[in-house]
Amino acid sequence: MDLTKWATEKRNPDTINIDELSTLQVVKKIHEADLRVASCITPVLSEISTVVEKVVGAFENGGRLIYIGAGTSGRLGVLDASECPPTYGTNPNLVVGLIAGGEYALQHAIEGAEDDFDLGKTDLENVNVSEKDVVLAIAASGRTPYCLGAMEHARKQGAFTAALVCSQHSPMEKASDLGITVVTGPEVVTGSTRMKAGTAQKLVLNMISTASMIKWGKIYSNLMVDVQPTNAKLKQRAKNIIMEAAGVSEKEAAQALQEQNGNTKAAIFQLVTGVSVNEAKMHLELQNGRLKEAIKKFTLNGEG
């Protein structure tokens, strides 16, 4: 296997003597490399946008976003998926993160798991992937057999497949319906793709999940109105969001939040429109939980 043909495995000429530098110089080298990562994403914003539109369409038709990867790439997918329920109040099964080797692999290296083509297929079979879903495979090199197996199975089931990779003309890019290729180049430490490549992947995953939730109506203005107030910090955040969106005092926000059993979005609608607790929920349901659309509809109908 010739790894050197992949950009992420090449040696970085800027860091050949990094082991001879002072600590501050080492840190500066890493920082300089990191500063260039965000600009590497600019050429693929259109592809990212297309994936977001596919994801929103999947959500609206009862489908899911499924991330799948190995090692660092898999962990980043699982991380992004796990952040969606508390941030956006989504069902844990809406955005799914799969990693080669399962949960144990989140903290431990599972030797050989990424090389198992059939394991990728099996993991997607276990979550019943279908034509309703979007499957996003993640790998810096773009050659991971585990991901290729998953993608082959996903396409056979009719799912839309995308590949997030950091090497051009990779097998995963070619096997996908749409490739997102972020060319981050050689790493500071040769082959350590948890660095620039991992940072780029994290940025792209943030974009995909966040933009999808915005377009799906989980955000009002720029407020996370579906936040789940499950601890002290999030309860205060929910009250702050209600105060911002409805222009009320903290006391009024807290009361509405309590009346709506922690439903931040319903509390806002109740306060903005003056309707009852149950009516707020009804109006939101009629607009599929889209708060801005529900308020506009209510206002246009002269119900206020």
Image: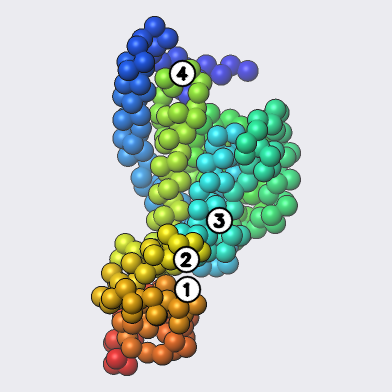
Dot 3: within a 10 Å radius of its alpha carbon, few (fewer than 14), some, or many (20 or more) residues? many
Which residue is found at the position 67% from the left and 43% from the top?
103
Name the amino acid, label 4: Val
Q: Is residue 54 above or below residue 249?
A: above
Name the amino acid, label 3: Val
Give the CA distance from mark 3 to mark 4: 32 Å
* Residue 227 in sight in this render: no
Along the polypeptide, which appears first: circle 2 or circle 3?
3
Mark 4 residue element? loop
Along the polypeptide, which appears first: circle 3 or circle 4?
3
Q: Nearer the viewer, mark 1 or mark 4?
A: 1
Per the image, the residue denoted by label 2 is: 229
Along the polypeptide, which appears first: circle 1 or circle 3?
3
Q: Is residue 98 above or below residue 273?
A: above
Give the CA distance from mark 1 to mark 2: 6 Å
Q: Position of residue 101 (x, y in %)?
A: 69, 38
Q: Position of residue 165 (x, y in %)?
A: 49, 35
Q: Are marks 1 and 3 in contact (CB under 8 Å)?
A: no
Q: Are marks 2 and 4 in contact (CB under 8 Å)?
A: no
Q: Which numbered tag is attached to residue 262? A: 1
Per the image, the residue denoted by label 3 is: 95
